[in-house]
């Protein structure tokens, strides 16, 4: 899990998989950015190839938390076909800016 802190936003680049074994680490990384006071978080999915319901739940939970703070979670670089298809299928773009 790679974290970056910029002036206006925090950025997380998760590994290839966000599943039951890594979802807690992903949540903790999102929380670390949130706890630094950031209202905008970017999740760079350039390496992501697999995400399960635990990972999706973390994305949605943090989108809600950031909205309450007047910010938002943005997902970028959805390059893997499986991830793109999954996000399209569940219409994640209705909840999170992709």
Image (cartoon, rainbow, N blue to C red):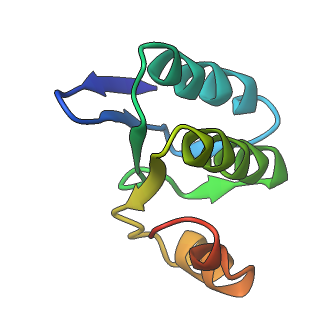
Residue 65 found in image quarter: top right
Compared to 78, does 63 lie above or below? Answer: above
Q: Residue at x 33, y 63 (%)?
A: 77
Compared to 96, does 19 lie above or below? Answer: above
Viewer-proximal residue among 94 and 12? 94
Position of residue 53 in the picture relative to residue 73 (left or right): right
Q: Quadrant of the C terminus?
A: bottom left
Q: Residue at x 71, y 86 (%)?
A: 89
Tell me residue 39's x, y (percent). 42, 36
Position of residue 55 in the picture relative to residue 88 (left or right): right
Position of residue 23 in the picture relative to residue 46 (left or right): right
Q: Residue at x 64, y 69 (%)?
A: 95
Tell me residue 38's x, y (percent). 39, 27
Residue 6 found in image quarter: top left
Counting the numbered discs, the total is: 0
Q: Residue at x 42, y 13 (%)?
A: 36
Tell me residue 66's x, y (percent). 55, 41
Compared to 23, does 60 lie above or below? Answer: below
Tell me residue 7's x, y (percent). 16, 27
Position of residue 93 in the picture relative to residue 10 (left or right): right
Residue 22 found in image quarter: top right
Viewer-proximal residue among 15 and 88? 88
Return the residue found at the far left: 7
């Amino acid at each position: 899990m790679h974290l970056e802190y910029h002036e206006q936003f925090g950025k997380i680049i998760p590994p290839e998989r966000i599943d039951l074994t890594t979802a807690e680490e992903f949540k903790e990384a999102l929380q670390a950015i949130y706890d630094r006071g950031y209202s905008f978080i970017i999740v760079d999915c350039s390496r992501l190839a697999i995400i399960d319901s635990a990972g999706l739940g973390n994305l949605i939970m943090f989108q809600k938390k950031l909205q309450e703070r007047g910010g938002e979670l943005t997902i970028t670089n959805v390059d893997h076909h499986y991830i793109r298809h999954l996000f399209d299928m569940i219409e994640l773009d209705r909840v999170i800016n992709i």
